[in-house]
Image: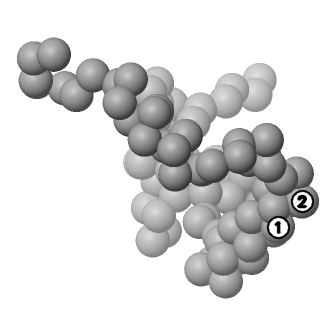
Amino acid sequence: MTQTYRAILKNNQITWLGDRPNLSEAEEVDIVVVRSLAAPSKAEQQQKVATLLAQLAAVRPFEDIPDPVTWQREQRRDRALPFREN
């Protein structure tokens, strides 16, 4: 019978998440890697950000705002500041 348990493998050590199997000290198990938790490299992160910024620029989300400075001031004025009385 196959049972599934979640765990993290780090430096050849398994840390069980939640329920853990009832195993004897020398019991052999098969481990199936479902996904890698490795973070993307810095170069991959930079490339993704550059791609997203290029997509955002292509959409031109702010082109209907005639004066961005005035718009920004109006937005900030409407917002109540935390821990301050109006």
Residue 49 appears in the picture as rendered: yes
Of residue 14 and residue 52, the one placed in the foreground of this image is 52
Q: Position of residue 55 (x, y in %)?
A: 85, 59
- Give the quadrant of the N terminus: top right
Crowding at mark 2 (Cα within 10 Å: few <14, some 14-19, many 20+): few
Q: Residue at x 74, y 73 (%)?
A: 50
Q: Position of residue 58 (x, y in %)?
A: 89, 59
Residue identifier under label 2: 58
Q: Position of residue 28 (x, y in %)?
A: 61, 51
Residue identifier under label 1: 54
Amino acid at pointer 2: Ala
Report, in whole angstroms, how far the alpha carbon at label 1 lies from the one at label 2.
6 Å
For residue 30, above or below residue 52: above
Image side of residue 82 versus residue 16, left or right:
left
Image side of residue 10 versus residue 58, left or right:
left
For residue 51, above or below residue 71: below
Of residue 75 and residue 47, the one placed in the foreground of this image is 75
User: Number of marks in the image?
Assistant: 2
Q: Nearer the viewer, mark 1 or mark 2?
A: 2
